Image: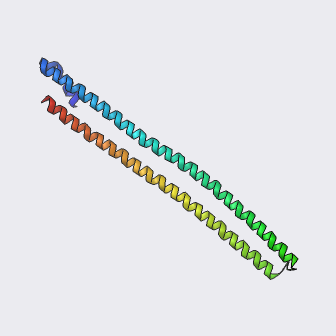
Amino acid sequence: RFLAAVEIAIPNADAIFKEKLKLAQAELTNAFSAQANDLAYNVKQRENALKDLRETIARQSAFLTLDEQAQLREIEVQYRNTLEEARTSAAEAGFTFSTRATEKEGLLATQTGEMRESTARKFGYQQAEIGQKLSIAERDTNAEIARLQQVAQENSQEMLRKGEGAIG
């Protein structure tokens, strides 16, 4: 509004005041343009950093999923090998269908199940931690952008006051 008022006042002012108005108008226009560009740059920088973080987290999440699958396969292979060894040693000792062999197989199955569950919990915790980092980054980035916009608005008001003071 102030710049519009200056625009209207320029043709009606005397020569000296007209130049003073044109100078103030140019300074304010340049200042507002520089501030808008600075704000846009800072906002874009924050948005790009958040985008990069999202991509990094997506890669980490995919890697964790692959790592978890690999560990679960490793547990399964270890279970099958240990079970086969237990059955072979029981058969060599003549305990193919004994209670002792059955108990050993049951204990091995329980231990393997616990290892799977522990692995799943570990990776679940890591996934949750990654998600929390992203949430915190999004919250902080949005707050920073809002702060930058508020500062830009306050600076605009300050520039207008200075312009009014310069014109008189």
Instruction: Give x and y (percent) for residue 113.
Output: 68, 69
Which quadrant of the structure image shows residue 42? Answer: top left
Instruction: Give x and y (percent) for residue 23.
Output: 20, 24
User: Camera-side residue: 139 or 67?
Assistant: 67
Q: Please, which colouring scheme is shown?
A: rainbow
Q: Tell me: 86 left or right of 57.
A: right
Instruction: Give x and y (percent) for residue 160.
Output: 21, 34
Q: Which residue is drawn at 17% across and 24% down?
A: 21
Q: Which residue is drawn at 14% across and 19% down?
A: 12
Image quarter hosting the C terminus: top left
Q: Which residue is drawn at 14% across and 33% down?
A: 165
* Vertical placement of residue 33 versus 60, above or below: above
Q: Tell me: 12 left or right of 126.
A: left
Which quadrant of the structure image shows residue 152? Answer: top left
Q: Which residue is drawn at 31% across and 30% down?
A: 33
Image quarter hosting the N terminus: top left
* Vertical placement of residue 23 versus 86, above or below: above
* Vertical placement of residue 112 versus 5, above or below: below
Furthest residue in direction bottom, as rendered: 99
Q: Tell me: 86 left or right of 64.
A: right
